[in-house]
Amino acid sequence: MHRTELTELIVARRIEAGVTWQDLADAVDRPVVWTTAALLGQHPIPRPEAEVLVEKLGLPTDVVALLGAVPVRGTDRDVAVSDPTIYRLYEALAVYGPALKELIHEKFGDGIMSAINFSLDIDKVPHDSGDRVVITFDGKFLPYDWVSGR
Amino acid sequence: MHRTELTELIVARRIEAGVTWQDLADAVDRPVVWTTAALLGQHPIPRPEAEVLVEKLGLPTDVVALLGAVPVRGTDRDVAVSDPTIYRLYEALAVYGPALKELIHEKFGDGIMSAINFSLDIDKVPHDSGDRVVITFDGKFLPYDWVSGR
Amino acid sequence: MHRTELTELIVARRIEAGVTWQDLADAVDRPVVWTTAALLGQHPIPRPEAEVLVEKLGLPTDVVALLGAVPVRGTDRDVAVSDPTIYRLYEALAVYGPALKELIHEKFGDGIMSAINFSLDIDKVPHDSGDRVVITFDGKFLPYDWVSGR
Amino acid sequence: MHRTELTELIVARRIEAGVTWQDLADAVDRPVVWTTAALLGQHPIPRPEAEVLVEKLGLPTDVVALLGAVPVRGTDRDVAVSDPTIYRLYEALAVYGPALKELIHEKFGDGIMSAINFSLDIDKVPHDSGDRVVITFDGKFLPYDWVSGR
Amino acid sequence: MHRTELTELIVARRIEAGVTWQDLADAVDRPVVWTTAALLGQHPIPRPEAEVLVEKLGLPTDVVALLGAVPVRGTDRDVAVSDPTIYRLYEALAVYGPALKELIHEKFGDGIMSAINFSLDIDKVPHDSGDRVVITFDGKFLPYDWVSGR
Amino acid sequence: MHRTELTELIVARRIEAGVTWQDLADAVDRPVVWTTAALLGQHPIPRPEAEVLVEKLGLPTDVVALLGAVPVRGTDRDVAVSDPTIYRLYEALAVYGPALKELIHEKFGDGIMSAINFSLDIDKVPHDSGDRVVITFDGKFLPYDWVSGR
Amino acid sequence: MHRTELTELIVARRIEAGVTWQDLADAVDRPVVWTTAALLGQHPIPRPEAEVLVEKLGLPTDVVALLGAVPVRGTDRDVAVSDPTIYRLYEALAVYGPALKELIHEKFGDGIMSAINFSLDIDKVPHDSGDRVVITFDGKFLPYDWVSGR
Amino acid sequence: MHRTELTELIVARRIEAGVTWQDLADAVDRPVVWTTAALLGQHPIPRPEAEVLVEKLGLPTDVVALLGAVPVRGTDRDVAVSDPTIYRLYEALAVYGPALKELIHEKFGDGIMSAINFSLDIDKVPHDSGDRVVITFDGKFLPYDWVSGR
Amino acid sequence: MHRTELTELIVARRIEAGVTWQDLADAVDRPVVWTTAALLGQHPIPRPEAEVLVEKLGLPTDVVALLGAVPVRGTDRDVAVSDPTIYRLYEALAVYGPALKELIHEKFGDGIMSAINFSLDIDKVPHDSGDRVVITFDGKFLPYDWVSGR
Amino acid sequence: MHRTELTELIVARRIEAGVTWQDLADAVDRPVVWTTAALLGQHPIPRPEAEVLVEKLGLPTDVVALLGAVPVRGTDRDVAVSDPTIYRLYEALAVYGPALKELIHEKFGDGIMSAINFSLDIDKVPHDSGDRVVITFDGKFLPYDWVSGR
């Protein structure tokens, strides 16, 4: 089975089984964003966690090895962006991305926020004018550094 | 003058003047992300703040009206994405965007995080393994709602 | 089954069954634009309505859960735009979109027409020179507002 | 002068002059959407109206002929779509376009809504949950008809 | 069956059956361009004609309803343009399209040639220097007209 | 001067001078489609005709050589297609192009309609239901022929 | 069977059978470039030759009619260009294409090299510094000629 | 001056001066394809030849250094392909490119035709059915070879 | 079987079998980068090596011929670039590619680094600040050389 | 001045001045790849080095501040890839990129080679079959690590 077929199967099985992503995260004691992303094909899943998830979702047991392989990451952007819920995230970057670049350089110097040494969280925050979606990107600052190992 | 020409002028003048974005934000008593984005052409700037900023940056005074007009927002994505500092933000969405969609729906129901009733913040957080860039998206949840005003 | 496969099945079954979209909307007592869009994969359908529609269209009963899941919305634009009936809608935006932006800002201030708190209607209006297609977009105005929940 | 340069000049002059689009429409006694679109380069403007508008905006008088020429219509879509206010209009079509196609065919038969024998209006409608932007597309139905003039 | 699959089936069956497009047009007493385009998925085919064509091509009888549905029109342009026979048609528009626009406006005023109230013909015309392909576009002129049905 | 700049100049001068394309064609005794296309940069213009046209349009006399050079032909398709008048021509090909390919092969054999040994005409044809735009493509049939000159 | 599926089958069968393209060309007594291109889906193959090739490649006999139909020509360019062997051909055009245009016009006048009345050959030419690939494009010159058959 | 500006200047000056590419090639005693390509910005031109060409074309003498620099090669493909004379070259590759790949491998083994150790020639060859354009690509065969210099 | 299907099968079988790429390279005594690339469809694999690899991976034995055929090389760039591990390689070229071009010309003259007479290596190099990935491109310099074999 | 204009100026001045990139690197005692890339707009240049380079290249002294600002990095890929010297680098990634991904994961685990904590070198290595271009990418391995600073 190809990993993208497995992802489609996971998506279908979760809906049929009526299980939440939070349930699945709790079952393996991992953060819910990590667990959801991993099941959607963005992170390898270690064998013990994979075995639990395979059972909870009623997947064939021989996919454990595939779940443990490093996947080809990323999302077909044309598909992703057509959805309004995802589009708003990209819209925020289109409006504020250059400002963030300027401020990363002003606060930290020349470099980047790592997307590898990185975590991401989502919270529901009550507010007088209605609940708010709060998403936090948290990545290590990496300064440009001209290092050679040879 | 076209707004994009004004943006280029602002970018050049700030470097020549050696003024930080934080200085400019302080001068108008607004959040630094908002101020930076507004100067880069993403928000209209009210007259009083515009007058202060025009003076600080040594811009011609007749651009105050243009700074106050609602701009055509957004960034040429091809240009923006070629820069590694900005790219990491898009990479995070490519890896975690579908997971965020699933979790917004699981936590809030069918709808979106607004990018209009919205704020964005960036912090420098010390950590044992090195300083961290922490970026917070904070938008009102808007449920899909089939309302008619007629 | 993947939601796009289910959409193709719905399209085929409706033609075979000779049922109109209006019939389907009446059966679930919902607006016809909403019902059509939902069946075409743009809105989740609550269980009671889904059960009625599944029966009317002779779909397998186990798709009720899938119809109730929040879909990945949107249309492959290249495909959609090649059809002359759909193209005329995009043509109207190409010609009048920037004017609408100017007038939204002039009448309401800086912000957007929501496409989430939104409804859409289509009417057949008789006219001396021939029947007219009248399509109404009706969305809540959302002003740009820099709010933080933290 | 090229028409796109004239459009940029009109945009700049209107902001400097502090004149509203409604003022300009009133001055020539035409619908405001038509007037705004025409000034933005989407319709030829007859000589009498052009002369009035040239005076109100302080444009050089020799642009009257250019304003009267049939323009190359349309908008660079990549630019237009990057703006959130315009994007919501396209989003509505991405979500509801195929449903509108189905319903045009169901209500009228095989054919299109004309975007040429067409008008477009925008209203501000008060509502308990906030003002609403109501945009109306109004085009003649044109049935597919295999006619030959020879 | 999806309409594009049906189109592929029609293409294959016609070659296997050794039937010409003209034969098929004669069998239903319709213009050959219309008949060919309709079978290739560009026009709905009324039941009586569909029944004749289904029999001539040996298609399964249950596709009559699908042939009668309004199709999603248009051609994947990248595919179409790679073929030299089709490409020459697009090349003619690339070279003469802007001239045609100027002359439509000069001869008729501001408006378009309809592609809906429209017919198209192809003839073989003998000539001393070799046979000529003569293709005629014949569409009603539609003037831009700002009409409202409300 | 670059040929595209010259084209823009020609477009502007013709509007200012209030001269029709037909006037220009008459002045050089050439078909109006050829003349319009040539002035818009699609055909070299022989010296005698170029001298007449330069005078009629009040162009600088040193552009005669440039008008006589073989141009880089074609139109930026994205720009051209955004205009509804031009778009309808492309729409006709999107709907009928594959049918034309089939019929060229059925009537003539394997080959193409030349767009080089080619002429194009546009007529205004009165009709009870309104004037019709009739456009004729007229190209020599060229059969695929595996010839070698060596 | 669709012609692209047949092409994939031909590609696979030839490898399995260990037959060279030259063998296949010899079997039907046609030029090897023509034969290879025809089998790869670029030219119709007359019945006698098709029957020989079907036997040599062990294809099902009912594909003879499909091999004889005029194909949709061309190659998906994105796919083709990713291969270094094919890419070098495109690279030569990227570097020398505009020069060839200039020289065709200088040597022949305004017109094109036909790609229809055309042949193409490939030779292996020994050279002191290593064997050379020599590819010859050989097409009839077609002058631009404004001919009408009506 | 940027090299692309210099190219535009060369193109204009050559037309004004009425000099052929062959004249220019003769003046520097180089092949005409090489000379034309070099002047169009595809090869550096050594100082002695550059000085001759600068004089023949009446260019400012200080461009000799720029003509001698290694250029950024290649052509904007969208522009190049819109011209029918150039397009026919690409069309030949679209139709015959995959066949050439197969035959290079069959005749030479796994590898490529170099486009660097390469020459290209164009000839006018008389033929009973009309003059022929004969273009020869002549490149060294380079076999895939896994060599390491370390 | 199509080569891309075989590649997917190889990818799946290797994971299931728990074999490393290094194991496979050792089994055929070839460099590991070459072996991995060849199995992923980028190089033909000679029969003896192919037979060993087919056995190690438990592939059907009849794929040996397909593994030995020259493949259509290259990677769908959109897919490849979405993965962060691969993207960093492209990012390095986006940042340093033009500098490498300048330095190749400065050190070697006008020409290229061959990607055909070429090898590539990857090493793990310990360093105080963490292990380093060291990738070496090693290609023969090929000077631009206008050679003709005729 | 905009940074891209400054880059064009630097490119032109270096050619006119006849200075090598190595000379410039020596003048500021930095690696030549870093220096070249920095001058081409990919790295900020500290004030002391910027002052030396400004003098060597005869640039206006007020560009020192602009050279010191963090640039928007990256290259317009369409432009860069059209050049054969640069293209070979991308070709190597198209052929070997997926293999490198597999081997990074096999040798280091799940993660990336940093392009930030990174250096790049180019050498000329003599070899019996001709000089070789050896390019070394040297980046720190960064393992995927779900760290949060909050």
Image: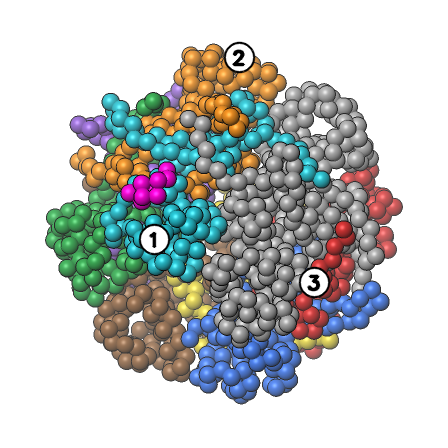
Chain colours: A cyan, B orange, C green, D purple, E brown, F yellow, G blue, H red
The residue sitting at 76% across, 60% down in the picture is: H118
User: Label 3 near label 2: C-beta < 8 Å?
Assistant: no
| Location of mark 3 (residue) | H144
In the rendered view, tell whether residue F87 sits above or below residue E26: above
The image quarter in which residue H141 lies: bottom right
Number of numbered tags placed on the structure image: 3
Mark 3 belongs to chain: H
Instruction: Tell me where residue E114 appears, x and y as whole percent.
Output: 35, 55
Residue G118 can be seen, yes or no: no
In the rendered view, tell whether residue F122 sits above or below residue E48: above
User: Label 2 near label 1: C-beta < 8 Å?
Assistant: no
| Location of mark 1 (residue) | A54
Q: Is residue H32 magenta?
A: no
Q: Is residue A30 magenta?
A: yes
| Location of mark 2 (residue) | B56
Which of the two discs, 1 and 2, sits closer to the camera? 1
Give whichever of D95, E104 is nearer the camera: D95
The residue sitting at 38% across, 83% down in the picture is: E17
Provide the residue span drawn in magenta.
A23-31
- Classify mark 3: helix, strand or loop: loop
- Find the distance from the CA under tag 2 to the CA under tag 3: 62 Å
Residue H61 can be seen, yes or no: yes
Give whichever of B16, F104 is nearer the camera: B16
Instruction: Tell me where residue D16 appears, x and y as whole percent.
Output: 44, 20
Report whether mark 2 lies on the same chain as mark 3.
Answer: no
